Image (spheres, grey):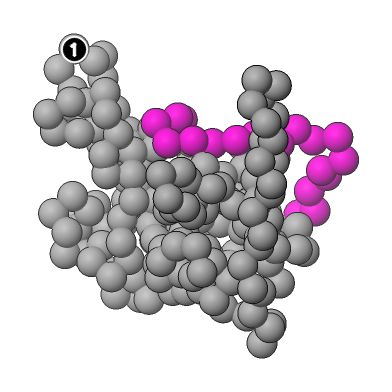
Amino acid sequence: MCGKFTAMASWRKVVAFSQPLEEAGDERVTYRVAGILPVIVHDREAAARKIVPMQWGFPHPRDPRRPQPIHARSETIDTTAAFAQAFRDGQRGIVAMRTFNEGEEVGSKTVQWTVEPADGAVRGLAFIWRRFEIEGRDGPVLACAMCTVPANALIAPITDRMPAVLEESDWPRWLGETDAPPEAAKALLRTVEGTDWRMTPEDRVPNPRKRPDASPSPPAQPKLL
């Protein structure tokens, strides 16, 4: 399941992507579980979008230092105790992504694959967020979990889940900028098929102490619809 994704550094300050974005020389930033994400949310009082830093992963009830859960299944996001109230209250966010990773369990090892839309366009990953009061911390902790859906035909050979990817036209409904009911927001969490995406083994810096292993062969690529 996805535990890492990338975006361009300039996107951390941009909440609307209708204007062209310059990526020449832009740094690619990697976001990981337990790290801080720039989450786009809808500020109802200001009637505008803003970016709020949030921890990726809810603090575990018995050990707040441990992020768990980090994912929210789309099928049960409105009934699972950890997410249901936040979902109904519109505590839904988006993080812009350039690529995302998926892990394939191969024996006792996990092989990382990088999934990248071939057109290079900005896409949003759906998140759900909550506010937590933690003893010993000054002020509330904002934490989020990535929404997931069943894997599409490209990713299914290595894992059964993938992030919920939102097209820009879906952002207003997901963020709660419209009067659409929660059921309409949930309907946006669907598997994206027939896309021009590439999936390749993640590039890793070789360890000089170890013999380089042969790169895994990519799974068969389905034909685009």
The front one of 158 and 217 is 217
Is 166 displayed left or right of 184 in the figure?
right
Majority secondary structure of magenta residues: loop
Q: Is residue 179 visible?
A: no
The front one of 14 and 201 is 201
At which x and y percent is residue 37?
A: 48, 36
The front one of 185 and 58 is 58
Is 45 displayed left or right of 75 in the figure?
right
Is 56 displayed left or right of 124 in the figure?
left
Q: Would residue 21 be counted in the magenta stretch?
A: yes
Residue type at the position of mark 1: Gly
At which x and y percent is residue 181?
A: 30, 72
Q: Secondary structure at mark 1?
A: loop
At which x and y percent is residue 194?
A: 63, 80
Residue under label 1, please give it.
136
The residue sitting at 64% across, 79% down in the picture is 222
At which x and y percent is residue 108?
A: 41, 44
Q: What's drawn in magenta, residue-wise?
A: 19-36
Q: Quadrant of residue 61?
A: top left
Q: Quadrant of residue 197?
A: bottom right
Is 160 displayed left or right of 8 in the figure?
left
